[in-house]
Amino acid sequence: MKLKVARVEKSLSQQELADLCEVTRQTIGLIEKGKYNPTLNLCIRIANALDKTLNDLFWDEEI
């Protein structure tokens, strides 16, 4: 998933990203696996933490 690639590019662990976004590591892991739909607010916090846009992380280009 794009989120994991972006996180690794920033050299962040799941825990470090979770801390920046004020969620648990498990939440980040589930989002990366596509097993959890984050709220829009959480999507925005993740995008800001990774210096990406929402489109970069969460939407397919095909849509």
Image (cartoon, helix red, strand yellow):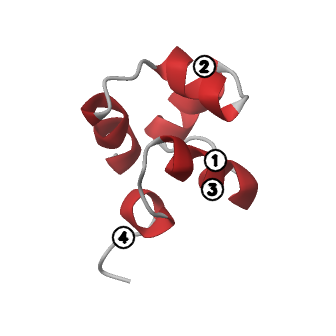
Using a 10 Å C-alpha cutoff, classify the residue at mark 3 as few (fewer than 14 neighbours), some (14 to 19) or many (20 or more). some
Q: Earlier in the sequence, mark 4 or mark 3?
A: 3
| Percent coordinates x, y for residue 6 in the rendering | 33, 42
Cα–Cα span, label 3 and label 1: 4 Å
Residues at circles 3 and 1 in contact by the CB criterion of under 8 Å: yes
Give the number of the disc on residue 25.
Answer: 2
Is 45 displayed left or right of 48 in the figure?
right
Secondary structure beneath dot 2 equals helix
Cα–Cα span, label 2 and label 4: 24 Å
Label 1 belongs to which residue? Answer: 45
Label 3 belongs to which residue? Answer: 44
Residue found at x 30% / y 80%: 62
Cα–Cα span, label 2 and label 1: 14 Å
| Percent coordinates x, y for residue 10 in the rendering | 32, 32
The amino acid beneath tag 4 is: Asp
| Percent coordinates x, y for residue 7 in the rendering | 37, 34
Residue found at x 36% / y 70%: 60
The amino acid beneath tag 3 is: Ile
